[in-house]
Amino acid sequence: MLSSRMLQILRERKDMIEDKNKQRKLRVMLLALALSCHPTAGFAQAAGTDGNSVAEGVATLKQLLQESRDRLRAYEWTETTVVRLKGDEKARRLSRCHYRIDGKIERAVVSIATPQKKKEELTDYIERAITLVRNYVPPDLAEIQRIQNLGRASIHVIEPEKRVSVEFHDYWLQGDKLNVEVDLSNTRLAGLNVSSFLGETRDPVSLEVRFGVLPDGSTYPAEALLEARAKKLNVAVTNSEHRKRGN
């Protein structure tokens, strides 16, 4: 088991490193070591039980999210959103996307297909569902830091020294839960899961996101699937056809 002094030395070394790639690897190593020093923090840990491990987990996640966004600034891609109700396709929207200078994603609709007859209430529900996906994907760096500062973040070991998940409670809505999985062995984002609510009746919804990796190592949310069981509605969002901007 590592001493607190050794962990402190690693933290000081991390602060001295300027190269982002080396700093990221050292941060992941530090997180793995911090968790190994607190084995009981690995499963069903309450938020704030081990402040160092949680802080390192959030810092690692923020760095990976920031690097993903920074790399994706050089790209544009196609976002395909498909809405199904009771298994039948009700809407399909294709958008050309890229990151703006302010860090937000800009979407230009290329094509949209919707049924001729659709209740206004359902239309509103669908738009809320699409907006809900965008509220969580990708997670906002300032928001996850705020949640951690409030003591509503925790970290859980999925596979020792290989995979962990960082969990945030009341991220966007009171009672929701955002869970982001980090692959420590490959130093990248692995997955994202959300339990949240939709509509005035607060229908429970689930959101599952799978991350992909581009040839240059850039990590991006490849597929997102939101399920609203009360309405038998699901929204699938796929990001594909990444290409360097200007090409």
Image (spheres, helix red, strand yellow):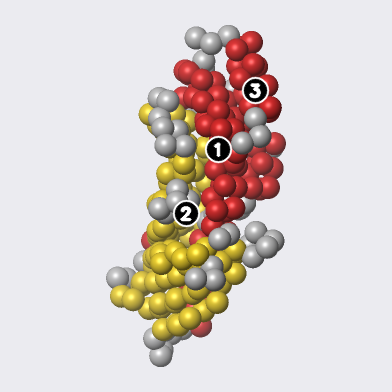
Image coordinates of residue 122 in percent, x first then y, are 47, 77
- Who comes first in sequence, dot 2 or dot 3? 3
Q: How many marks?
A: 3
Residue 220 badge: 2
Task: Say which of 32 and 86 sits in front.
Answer: 32
Image coordinates of residue 142 in percent, x first then y, are 68, 47
Q: Quadrant of residue 146?
A: top right
Q: Quadrant of residue 233?
A: bottom left
Q: Are marks 1 and 2 in contact (CB under 8 Å)?
A: no
Residue type at mark 1 is Asn
Q: Is residue 67 left or right of residue 36?
A: right
Q: CA distance from mark 2 to mark 3?
A: 29 Å
Neighbours of disc 1 within 10 Å: few (<14), some (14-19), many (20+): few
User: Residue at the spot x=41%, y=67% of the render?
Assistant: 241
Q: Residue furthest bottom?
A: 116
Residue under numbered circle 1: 21
Above or below for 162 versus 169: above
Image coordinates of residue 13 in percent, x first then y, are 64, 22
Q: Taking the image as drawn, is residue 200 in sight?
A: no
Neighbours of disc 2 within 10 Å: few (<14), some (14-19), many (20+): many
Q: CA distance from mark 1 to mark 2?
A: 17 Å
User: Residue at the spot x=47%, y=44% of the render?
Assistant: 189
Q: CA distance from mark 3 to mark 1?
A: 14 Å
Q: Are marks 2 and 3 in contact (CB under 8 Å)?
A: no
Residue under numbered circle 3: 13
Q: Secondary structure at mark 3?
A: helix
Residue type at mark 3 is Arg
Residue type at mark 2 is Tyr
User: Residue at the spot x=42%, y=25% of the render?
Assistant: 161
- Who comes first in sequence, dot 3 or dot 1? 3
Q: Taking the image as drawn, is residue 53 in sight?
A: yes
Neighbours of disc 3 within 10 Å: few (<14), some (14-19), many (20+): few
